[in-house]
Amino acid sequence: MARLQNLLIRIAALKWGELCLVALYVSVVSGVIVALQYDFGEPFFSSTALDLLVPFGHYWRSLHFYSSQLFFLLCLAHFVAVLIDKSYLRLSYGKWLPLVLSLPVALLLLFTGYVLRGDATGENAGVIAENICLAVPLLGEYLNALLFAILEDGLKKVYANHLIGLGVLWGILCWDHVRKYRAHVTEHSLFLCLLLLLSLLFQAPMEPESLGVFHRPGPWFFLGLQEMLRFVPAFWAGIVFPLILVLALLQLRLADGLQKRAALYASSWLLIYTGLTLVALLR
């Protein structure tokens, strides 16, 4: 019975990975189409013009938005399935390290997409992210110049990182793992049809600036951090706290004696962040 259960978990992990690749393919194709009409010098105008003036523009933007969201969520599901299956124990630390680091890179990819919209949510998220980078001692200005530099260069750096830099980095980190998978779109036609239908029925969000609104919630995955920033300095909330989870995940493969402690730290981190997210949603 235990062997059957382990086999089912492994199959589930494989399926999550294949669906993740399908979502990535759709995100890349739709993203190229959206990028042809996007102007980082006029982000909000070009985004709204895509919806209003370009034929089927709102559909392509919605398809890119929802496929990107699903890509990240399926990455998390695949990662959780690997943790439950404990198949990561068969990986060397040299292979486990880039896979763990690929998660924050995928998160940054999703985050920069929100910033590039140029709407109220994206603008607010960009300002917070830039302040977090600048709060890093000694390296803050260099880190901000590498990732954002919105006050100085607008969205030029964010656009370059979203379109090329972060995508290439994620590919390098995951290549040895991803090349083992073969995700044929025809084998996941139901998932693809549901994704296409979702993008057709629900338009991707675009939130113009509203007069008199002082608190603007960020992206859904950013809410817990945004809530923590109300009580904790930017460096501790935006850098140290997320780093705890990354280090805990790395410890799972670093030393056998630390695995239980690392699992406890990761679980505690997730509980705290979930609680902060719920508080932010109820605010």
Image (tube, rainbow, N blue to C red):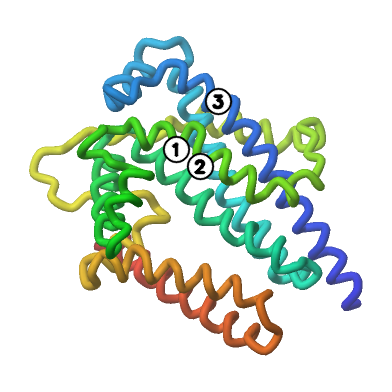
C-alpha distance separating marks 2 and 3: 17 Å
Q: Residue at x 55, y 75 (%)?
A: 248
Residue 157: give x, y in percent of width and height: 36, 35
Q: What is the quadrant of residue 92 in the picture?
A: bottom right
Lower sequence index among marks 2 and 1: 1
Q: Is residue 42 left or right of residue 164?
A: left
Q: Residue at x 27, y 34 (%)?
A: 119
Q: Are marks 2 and 1 in contact (CB under 8 Å)?
A: yes
Lower sequence index among marks 3 and 1: 3
Q: Which residue is mark 2?
A: 166
Residue 95: give x, y in percent of width and height: 71, 61
Residue 8: give x, y in percent of width and height: 84, 63
Q: Which residue is mark 3?
A: 30
Furthest toward the left, the residue is 212
Q: In terms of depth relative to the viewer, which is nearer, 269 or 282?
A: 269
Between label 2 and label 3, give the one nearer the viewer: 2
Residue 33 seen in render: yes
Residue 217 seen in render: no
